[in-house]
Amino acid sequence: MCTVCGCSGDDSKIDTGHPHDHANDHGHAHAAADGHGHHHDHAHDGDVLDYGAGPARAHAPGLSQARMVEIERGILSKNDGFAATNRARLKQAGVLALNMLAGPGAGKTTLLVETLRRLGQQVQAAVIEGDQQTSNDAERIRATGAPAIQVNTGKGCHLDAHMVGHAMAHLPLVAGSLLFIENVGNLVCPAAFDLGEHLRVTLLSVTEGEDKPLKYPDIFQNADLVVLTKTDLLPHLDVDIALLEANVARVAPTARILHVSTRSGAGMEAWIDWLRTRRSTLLADLAAAAEAHAAALRAAE
């Protein structure tokens, strides 16, 4: 994660789609080597050097495992504060937010474009697009008629809650609407950062192979839904889809798995139905909470 990957929020930029409407956003703290020696105490298994075996589950020259854990806790604690603020704003607005996670090229933007087209005017939605550079994906989203904010992270390899909170300020948060947060394409760092979302959706293209859930477990472990994309390519691939599903279930036993092809449309209705159900559940919960609060006020009179 960020104590070791070298990502930087110093170059982050918000693009609202309007000229001259940019804001620098310094999303998180960064750590330099503290000068202390690092004792290499890694497990070995044949020719494997396991640098993730220590308490920090990572390695950085010049940093002890204890120091890395301390830095990580500090970064995530500050991020969690921003995430709690985002979550409260979303609750007050009655908006369902989804954190969309995947590696580069898994089809996040294509899925969102097709989703927005199918939702049409029935359900309002907005999108926060995370990429290191360019506004290409936000422009694709805006072409559907949905509002989108591009967040360029510069050297940063993920979105954080501070960036998302700043982007939310530029979007219409309409009661009953959906907010899709398309994270930076990365199977590692985005998993560690709570953005204040209600749900996590991890996409995995079937072209990526059966072992990705085992090689990158963190991105799957907290997923509410795993979407296997580009399934129309399965007849042309040497992929064991049953093994892929088994590996997802092994690291994310409670996550639902959907098969989707935006090209053929297969699975899209199941995906849309899942969104509608989750949105209805949130709205029902908010209505029940409001009624309970009103009842408590009446009882206190």
Image: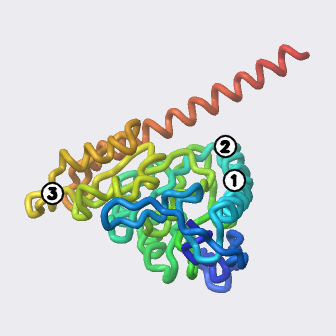
Residue 92 horizontal side relative to residue 209, left or right: right
Sequence-first disc among 2 and 1: 1
Q: Image point 63% across, 51% down: which residue?
A: 196
The quarter of the image holding the N terminus is bottom right
The Cα atoms of the two marked residues, 2 and 1, are separated by 16 Å
Which residue is label 3 attached to? 239
Instruction: From this view, report whether residue 126 is shown above or below residue 105.
Output: above
Which residue is label 1 attached to? 80
At label 3, which amino acid type do we have? Val
The quarter of the image holding the C terminus is top right
Which residue is label 2 attached to? 91
Instruction: From this view, report whether residue 248 is shown above or below residue 155.
Output: above
Front residue of 282 and 233? 233
At label 1, which amino acid type do we have? Asp
Q: Image point 33% across, 51% down: which residue?
A: 227
Counting every numbered tag in the picture gives: 3
Q: Name the secondary structure under disc 3.
A: loop
Spot occupied by residue 13 in the image (x, y as percentages of width and height): 63, 79
